[in-house]
Amino acid sequence: MKCIFGILTFSMLLISFVSEGQPDRLLQVREKDHYKILKEDSVVDYFGDKLPISSDLKLTDFGKYPNFSELRFCNSRKSGDTLVLTITGGNEAIDHHYEIKVFHSRFVIKYSFQTSGGEPTEIRQDSCSLVLDSSDFRKGKIIRGHTEFRGKCLKGCYKTDIHIVGNFKTIIN
């Protein structure tokens, strides 16, 4: 009976994890890789807070607005068996939100942004990848990785093709 309950619980968690509208993907782990971050741990002013840079994700083709394309801050939290990585960035004009959820050996990525005074975006994911240097998600552990996202903007964007790529690190909270 315990085995059936465990299988049902795992299945329900997996269904709720995958049901966010994006396909889940298989996580890659490469323990010997070191994911270097440009200007890592440099402290910058972000809306009045002094924060260390922990990501160098960038929209690769943001046209004439390159300073609006950086996602420089990575946070993490564990919720049950799910690791949630949130990578943010932007400035007064734009706010980026890149979220990665890892459940066992699977992951999903969602990306959105909003301009000041603008409507929220709707972005369809075409492809994504995630490589981590460890699958040990214990509290206090440092995780480094590389991610890439390609998608199409369906609503609220001035351009349609979205491509984000870069490295990140976080201490698991």
Image (cartoon, rainbow, N blue to C red):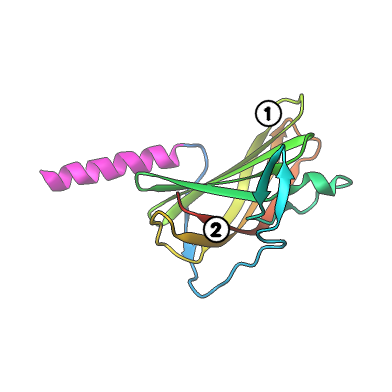
Instruction: Report x, y in % for residue 119.
Output: 72, 25
Give the SS element for disc 1. Answer: loop
Mark 1 burial class by Cα count in 10 Å: few <14, some 14-19, many 20+: some
Q: Answer yes or no: do the residues labelled 2 and 1 have beta carbons within 8 Å?
A: no
Q: Which residue corresponds to mark 1?
A: 120
Residue located 26% across and 41% down the image: 9
Residue 150 shows up from this direction: no
Instruction: Report x, y in % for residue 102.
Output: 45, 51
Q: Which residue corresponds to mark 2?
A: 130
Q: Which tag, 2 or 1, sits closer to the chain's start?
A: 1
Residue 161 shows up from this direction: yes
Residue nearer the viewer, 132 or 144:
144
Q: Amino acid at mark 1?
A: Pro
Mark 2 burial class by Cα count in 10 Å: few <14, some 14-19, many 20+: many
Q: Is residue 77 left or right of residue 147?
A: left
Instruction: Report x, y in % for residue 84.
Output: 48, 46
- For this orientation, the residue located farthest to the bottom is 32
Residue located 64% across and 49% down the image: 73
Quadrant of the image containing the N terminus: top left
Q: Is residue 64 left or right of residue 169?
A: right
From what the image shows, is residue 161 above or below residue 36? above
In the rendered image, residue 52 lying in the magenta stretch gets the answer: no
Range of residues picked out in magenta: 1-19
Q: Amino acid at mark 2?
A: Leu
